Amino acid sequence: MCLDCGCSIRGMEGKEEKHSHDGGKTFHSHTEEKDEHTHEHSHSDDHQKAHEHLHHNPQLNDVKTVAVIQKILDKNDKEADHNRTHLEEKNVLGINLMSSPGSGKTTLLEHLVDVAQFKFAVVEGDLETERDANRLRAKGIYAQQIQTGTACHLDAFMVHKGLHGMPLDEIDICFVENVGNLVCPASYDVGTHLNIVLVSVPEGEDKIAKYPVMFRQADLVLITKTDLLPHFKYDVEAEKAEARRIKPNVDILEVNVNDIDSVKAVADWIEFKRKMRA
């Protein structure tokens, strides 16, 4: 379920996940070249149907439904742990990028590739189209598209599917560019190690205070599009204070992609975290 918007995976009750990596008798089918790992990812389809079902039937928020929701969240967390283990076996740092639509996630990645000391690929989440993935590919960045349909966030099962297309032996960082949304992505562990949350100057001064769940999950907050400060009423220092009220000692950087030094500061932060984990 999305803990904040209230959608749940209705219809998963009583379904047990069968999952094998060692040639066991029970497994899901998920076939990729040079990859014997198999999965059938019905979880995301069930999530999408249930999401719509509960929004149209708010009376389903009962004890029984809550129990099912918790079961689904537990399964998601288990799969997220599996994703992290998979990344760690390859010595890859996973970073979840979250923000509202249009805050600059894709643009940041396009500019990071020019200054980063590390190699990276991207699991790209959008409801429809491959537009952002194609933008990244045009910059020579490997991008694996996940289309969620109507689901408002990525979950661990979707990301798991995306990881099987990743050249993990060739990269240092795997970014998960989550669906643009300041609510639901914060509630789902997708199996990364760090969360970076972007908030842009044109969004206004109230977003950090209004969406505390998201910023409470942040390891790094990026205030983006700072080149537009002359055109908007936006108190950067007040927003930093608000972010640190919600999560003391969170790291915060100001970013303007037209200022390469500000982009490099983001790359340096990521490289420092990568070396610390290594």
Image (cartoon, rainbow, N blue to C red):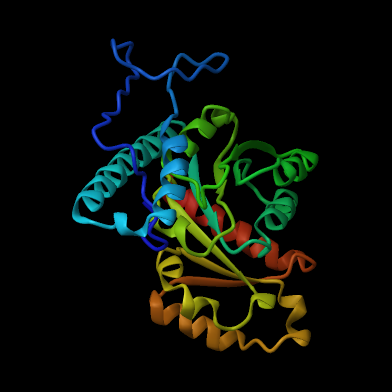
Compared across the picture, whether 151 is left or right of 213 comes to right
Q: Nearer the viewer, residue 108 or 182?
A: 182
Q: Tell me: 150 left or right of 55.
A: right
Determine which quarter of the picture holds residue 6: bottom left
Relative depth, front residue between 238 and 111:
238
Where is residue 126 shown, x and y percent of the image?
A: 62, 47
Vertical arrangement, residue 14 with respect to residue 77, above or below: above
Question: Can you give x and y, in whole percent of width and height, for residue 204 in the image?
Answer: 63, 81
Q: Could you say which is closer to the camera, residue 148 or residue 96? A: 148
Query: Where does residue 76 sit, x and y in percent of width and height?
Result: 34, 42
Q: Is residue 102 left or right of residue 218?
A: right
User: Residue 221: image x %, image y %?
Assistant: 53, 68
Is 60 or 172 nearer to us in this picture? 60
Q: Is residue 91 visible?
A: no
**Image quadrant where one finds the C terminus:** top left
- Residue 201 visible to the viewer: yes
Q: Residue at left 73%, top 70%?
A: 256
Q: How many circles with numbers are drawn on the protein?
A: 0
Which residue is drawn at the image coordinates 35% and 37% (left, top)?
79
Q: Residue at x 62, y 45 (%)?
A: 118
Residue 167 placement: quadrant: top right
Rendered view: 270 above or below 243: above
Q: Residue drawn at (47%, 35%), measured in percent from left and top?
A: 45
